[in-house]
Image (cartoon, rainbow, N blue to C red):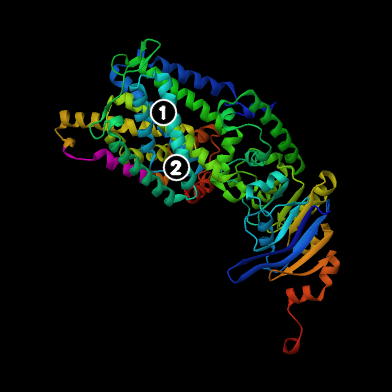
Amino acid sequence: MRVVFKKSYDRDIDLHEHWQSRGKMAVLAIIMIALPFLVGNYYLAEAANTLIWALAGMGLMIAVGHTGQVSLGHAAFLAIGAYTDAALMNLGLPFLIAFPVAGLFAGLFGAIIAVPAVRMSGIYLAIATLAVFVIVEELVILLDPITGGVGGIMAPSISIFGISFDRYASLSNFYWLVLAVVILVTWAYANLLRSPTGRSFLAVRDSEVSARALGINVTRTRALAFGLSSGVTGLAGALMGHYIGFFNYELFSIFISINLLLVVTIGGLGFIQGAFLGALLITGLPQLIAILRDGLNANFGIDLGAVPGLDTMLFSVLLILFIIFEPTGLYGRWLKIRTWFEIFPLARRDMFRRQKSYLKTERMK
Amino acid sequence: MSLLEVDDLAVHFGGVKAVDGVSFAVDEGEVFAIIGPNGAGKSTIFNLISRIYEPTRGTIHFEGEDIVGLKAHDIARLGIARTFQNIELFDHSTVLANLLMGRHTHRATNFISDLLFLPKVRREERAHRKRVEEVIEFLELEAYRNKMIAGLPYGVRKVVEIGRALAIGPRLILLDEPASGLSVEESQDVAFWIEDLRRDMGITVLMVEHDMSLVTQVSDRVLAVANGRPLAMGTPHEVQKHPDVQAAYLGTATGDDAA
């Protein structure tokens, strides 16, 4: 087990408290940057998709994981991001302006919605966000000239300073663009969590009454969290639009909202890493099923293609299993496995029991 | 002028008069205790001062400023900190993070500088940490600094809550039953800390407490309340001797009851 000897407060303020973990992040970053040279176009496109989902997952994680506000309406913010970005680019604005503005617009929309909505909590807030989703979906269909209505819209090709970042024409560039956005947002998110703003989010999540007694304006804090959450999700939506290429309102269905909730709960509520693990699962599992399906069909003549909704069923079973057996999600499980090895052979079976019982009752309220 | 002046304070929930015409004034540097049987309205008085409840009538002045018009989250900024009867800590954070949350009123950064973690934010963090370390040293919490609240024993959590209130840097601290559920040794520690709070830090203490030995030991003046109404006020000794107070706690010795 590693003991970090701290000689300055900066060791606690820094993102990584020793050079090994900093090194691990650097290695991961290098692998991710080198990915276009390592894998073919199919897997590169899948990697970009996973990163986009991780970005959306981080957006929702701010709301659900760190401020305890469950949202069933985050597909609406994906849609707002995607359509704002596409509309601005169709007006002739460059991507570098349209993209941040799309995030900003989704964020502002989220913050305005939040002012009345955050007075509710738990299931009531979830229903209110669901209503927002339905309204946005209708708006998308009604605003035909901008959104293409039911027919849909073509996401314009991205080009920055004359270099093409088109998803089909230059996939590697598009992948790097997505990666850059994800790294930037992850960095800002990690900063948030070590600063007063992030602490006030956690305070509001865990005890509203004492947050107030410490001088935290609960309504404003929750609205800020919801705004940041929907802003990041809006950015993910814009990238998703470019990734899909041609989309209509059906891309942002209620199932996307639910899948996003799966990303954060199965990944691990309250951890940035959870959003990534969850995204990996949600985008990887259908691929795995497809590969298995082909293999079974070719080798054994078993046709799973005839079973509809197989991945939906698998997801629901997974979700149920996680909520019962591992409420801290994939990342929580990973932390436990790591601790087991770090303190080997001192780990006891009940070491995490207390923590588990707390999470079951408190986290999602 | 007193630090905190409460005048004819009342709050009615429908027909229930939880607090009904309570007046008292806490002087600077004083330890003032409110005692009374269960349901007397002691914690309600605290919740009125920290603006969780809206008073039906009456005024509350802190340093001459009327605080009835203020919001709950404005109270800490004035220098009024509080603890809760049923510990309200942030369970999924470490002791250190909990204490740092107490520094919220002193933050000089906004969320944009926080997101970018500008050098200013780091400087602020160092300063907050320094203040929090002083509190940790004062309350001897060094061993628990990086422990999660969810795994801590009850007695330690009580102390962490006092610590979080101290991190605000208050002029007045409201302690809601600081010794409830503590062992004899632990409540003795609380008594010493209250003494130190007043003597070394110059913090005025207003507390609600059932443990009469603690009240007698530390408080300068005591207010006894029952059924939302004030019974007696004075030194701990005077109040304990007061016939109304004895009647409220032990029942009245009249007529058939006496026989």
Q: What secondary structure do most residues of the magenta stretch adopt?
A: helix
**What is the secondary structure assignment of the residue under circle 1?**
helix
Of the pair B155 and A236, the residue shown nearer to us: A236
Whether residue A268 can be seen here? no
Write down the chain letter for disc 1.
A
The disc placed on residue A113 is 2
- Residue A342 as seen in the image, left or right of residue B4: left
Percent coordinates x, y for residue A130 in the rendering: 37, 45
Of the pair A320 and B71, the residue shown nearer to us: B71
Verify whether residue A307 appears in magenta: yes
Q: Earlier in the sequence, mark 1 or mark 2?
A: 1
Verify whether residue B164 appears in magenta: no
Percent coordinates x, y for residue B145 in the rendering: 67, 39
Residue A266 found in image quarter: top left
Range of magenta residues: A306-320
* Placement of the C terminus of chain B among the 4 image quadrants: bottom right
- Residue B138 as seen in the image, left or right of residue A348: right
The residue depicted at 56 percent of the width and 38 percent of the height is A346
The residue depicted at 28 percent of the width and 20 percent of the height is A42
Write down the chain letter for disc 2.
A
Task: Using a 10 Å C-alpha cutoff, classify the residue at mark 1 as few (fewer than 14 neighbours), some (14 to 19) or many (20 or more).
Answer: many
